[in-house]
Amino acid sequence: MVYTLTCNPAIDYVVHTRKLQPGATNRAEDTELYFGGKGINVSAVLKELGIVSVALGFIAGFTGEALEKGVQAMGIRTDLVRLRSGNTRINVKIRSEENVAERQTGGTGREVFFCQETEINGAGPEVDGEAMESLLQKLDVLRDGDTLILAGSIPGSLPADTYARILKRLSGKKIRAVVDATKELLRNTLPCRPFLVKPNEQELGELFGVKLSSDPETEYYAEKLQELGARNVLVSMAGRGALLLDENGRKMRCSACRGEVRNSVGAGDSMVAGFVAGAVHGDYEQALKLATAAGGATAFSDGLAKRESIMKLLEQIG
């Protein structure tokens, strides 16, 4: 069984407007509501790929109840810890379409538009020791061969060794642990030898206090993550594709899919889902391709990737 953990889930409220004017009343042309968070996004894409998962995490208040119902309506099983106070956060994403006159020699009179996204992310509710212990007890049901995906940020009330604490508790079992986190939250898990870590290129650089500007540099610091304990390292590199260093000593690259980027939310989560689904039988080359296709399918969609679009991009990769 696959379990995903989202410690800080959210309701994403997406507002579309022609132009955002600060300090003025802006009217929405369209709105969308998404129930998620990184782990829940992974569960949603896993479902598209035929993998059943259970979504774990913390919810609070009436917004938490709405999120739980919304996730269940997506066909995802949940086993969430209800907090005694606070509310599950709401993230507001404002997508404004700016009109920019194209300037060309001779002048064509043609205009182009680009979409600018402004985000206001809410703060998560406080998670106390009792709630954390409830989560740990739920994780105790995991058995040898299960996969646990630890994805995203944690509430400020939890320490940076939270994910490491979870993996240490499960250390007596043969669990495939996947960590998609940043900075110390990721670094602290490395001695636990997670099955997979998936930073993007910027996050990888931040871990080591450097700014990566070339493929050899990215490969060098990905190797550092393996030296620190990660078994497989998957690095997403936006338009340059993805790099995988697997536990068998192989280095593999996959070119980015071709398409029009429409959305950045959930592309990394989709890559995690694709890799987990593709690695079921230990074929890491196929897992890398499916991860790249799933990430691209989300980037080229208005929401999370659907199976049909993933399979089309997988054919493109070859």
Image: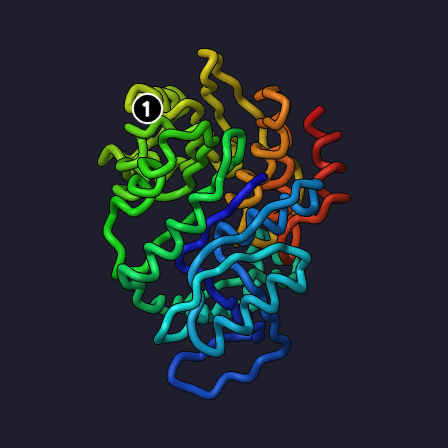
Q: Position of residue 81 (x, y in %)?
A: 44, 62
Of residues 88 and 120, the one nearer the viewer is: 88
Instruction: Give the residue at mark 1.
Output: 229
Image coloring type? rainbow
Which element carries disc 1, helix, strand or loop? loop
Q: Position of residue 85 (x, y in %)?
A: 35, 75
Q: In the rendered image, which quarter is residue 309 located in? A: top right
Of residues 17 and 166, the one nearer the viewer is: 166
In the rendered view, would you say 138 is above or below 49?
Answer: below
Farthest bottom residue in view: 25
In the rendered view, would you say 302 is above or below 185?
Answer: below
- Residue for point 34% across, 42% down: 166
Q: Bin the neighbour count of mark 1 within 10 Å (Cα to Cα): few under 14, some 14-19, many 20 and up.
A: some
In the rendered view, would you say 27 is above or below 189?
Answer: below
The N terminus is located in which quarter? Answer: top right
Q: Position of residue 168 (x, y in %)?
A: 31, 36
Q: In the rendered image, which quarter is residue 97 located in? A: bottom right
| Left or right for 286, reference 229 | right
Of residues 24 and 229, the one nearer the viewer is: 229
Q: Say if residue 99 shows up in the picture.
A: no
Of residues 123 and 99, the one nearer the viewer is: 123
- Residue for point 67% across, 64% down: 73
- What amino acid is at disc 1? Gly
Q: Position of residue 212 (x, y in %)?
A: 33, 32
| Left or right for 141, reference 279 | left
Q: Say if residue 210 shows up in the picture.
A: yes
